[in-house]
Image: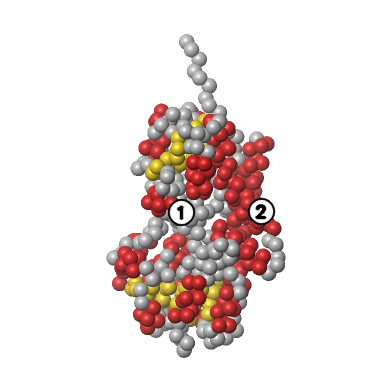
Amino acid sequence: MSPEREPVGVIGVGWVGLVTAVCFAELGHEVVARDIVPEKVESLARGETTIHEPGLEEMLRRNAERITFTTEMSELLDRARLLFVCVDTPPTYSGDADLSRVRTVVQELPEDSEHVLIMKSTVPAGTGHSIRRDRAGLPYVSCPEFLKEGTAVKDFMNPDRVVVGADAGDEGAAAAVAALYEPLGGEILHTDVASAEMIKLASNAFLATKISFINEIANVCEEVGADVGEVAAGMGLDARIGSSFLRAGIGYGGSCFPKDVSALKMLAGNTGYHFQLLTAVIEVNELQKRRVVSKLQKHLGSLIGKRIALLGLAFKPDTDDMREASSLVLAARLQGEGAEVVAYDPVAAGRAGEMLDSVEMAASALAALDGADAAVLVTEWGEFATLDWNDVAARMARPLIVDGRNFLDPKALAEAGFEYEGIGKTAIDAPAPAANG
């Protein structure tokens, strides 16, 4: 069997694992995917995805004959030599990564295993060395993922780079992993294991730093009357800076940035090094989520009894992921100020409802906006750009909006009669009343 068609095993079919399994099947591989949750395995076996990711369910059903979902580790080991580990590594109370699931996977491998363990989960630098020390002779490759939620399938099939980390003695295992990705055409970077582990953490920390930086610039822009959109555009034209991740807003969230930034900070701290820059990045991000409340108070005064509509709840559009979503902090702060919170999200309402049980979940954007004293755009879902804002203004008790993603057209909203607050932009006050006569 040629290397590029070798069977692939995937351990853990959460977001990363499921995308990995389905995309390798799309490339023509036989895939065996194992998870310990029977209900999830049964759902996937029926062709029903357990996450919202554009294009994923269609690709799963198209490749159903190539993918086997199972709860049995023995079936995985019997049918695949290359094993991608895609289990969760959530933060512990100390902020360090919880590697218990990774350790469990390693313990399940037989002592005389000829399998290759490929670490796709995000782990601290040094994890690979620790595993190799405990399991001498186990081929180990670090192959971190760089997928973005909402575009994960596209990102997998069109990678800008694939990092393959292996130490001396595992060159053959590294070559086998690289061969899996060669048909995709992205640059394949070969490193040692520790460097590969650090590349993932450093990449996400740098992107989070860009977001916090532009949010700080946005706050200064509000004070001096500048427009952060124009500032970011001018900055982005500098090839040394680039335009990506320079969109001001109400903070980053999701499964990667908060966890990975904290993990890198803790990794450095455990060695005795104080990573001061990341401390500031985290602080800026947390404060940014709360600035919306002061913007609302500027217009409404006390928020006690005020009905505030949140448009969007997921941490970004095209996903139902609520992990570290800005909406969680914002809803809690608004309720802490005495406001009545109603929310709408076209995809994430189900997951959000489990986490925000005291927030009213509306069936539509218009239902959420009916009678609201103010609206906050939290997630830039496309449907919000197409709302009839003249109609919305008539429905609301007060046409006031805080555009937390600078997604809407301030001029159009002003013409519809709205007071407008963006991030890093000049506020638009209430329109003057029409002259009599």
Above or below — where is 381 with respect to 179?
above
- Residue 297 is situated, as x and y percent measured from the top left of the image, at 56, 34
Q: Residue at x 69, y 58 (%)?
A: 276
Give me the disc on residue 322.
Answer: 1
Q: In this rendered view, identify the residue nearer to me: 123 or 432.
A: 123
Residue 210 visible in the snapshot: no
**Amino acid type, label 1:** Met
Judge from the rendering whether residue 58 lies leftward or rightward of residue 213; answer left or right. Answer: left
Residue 133 occupies quadrant: bottom right
The answer to whether residue 397 is visible is: yes
Residue farthest toward the bottom in the current orientation of the protein: 112
Q: Position of residue 306 (x, y in %)?
A: 47, 33
Q: Residue at x 60, y 40 (%)?
A: 424
Q: Nearer the viewer, residue 275 or 91?
A: 91
Which residue position is annotated with label 2? Answer: 280
Q: Tag count in the figure?
A: 2
Residue drawn at x 55%, y 60% as measured from the top left: 259
Q: Earlier in the sequence, mark 2 or mark 1?
A: 2
Q: Secondary structure at mark 1?
A: loop
Q: Position of residue 269 (x, y in %)?
A: 67, 65
Q: Is residue 338 left or right of residue 206?
A: left
Q: Position of residue 54 (x, y in %)?
A: 40, 57
Q: Residue at left 60%, top 84%?
A: 168
* Residue extending farthest top: 437
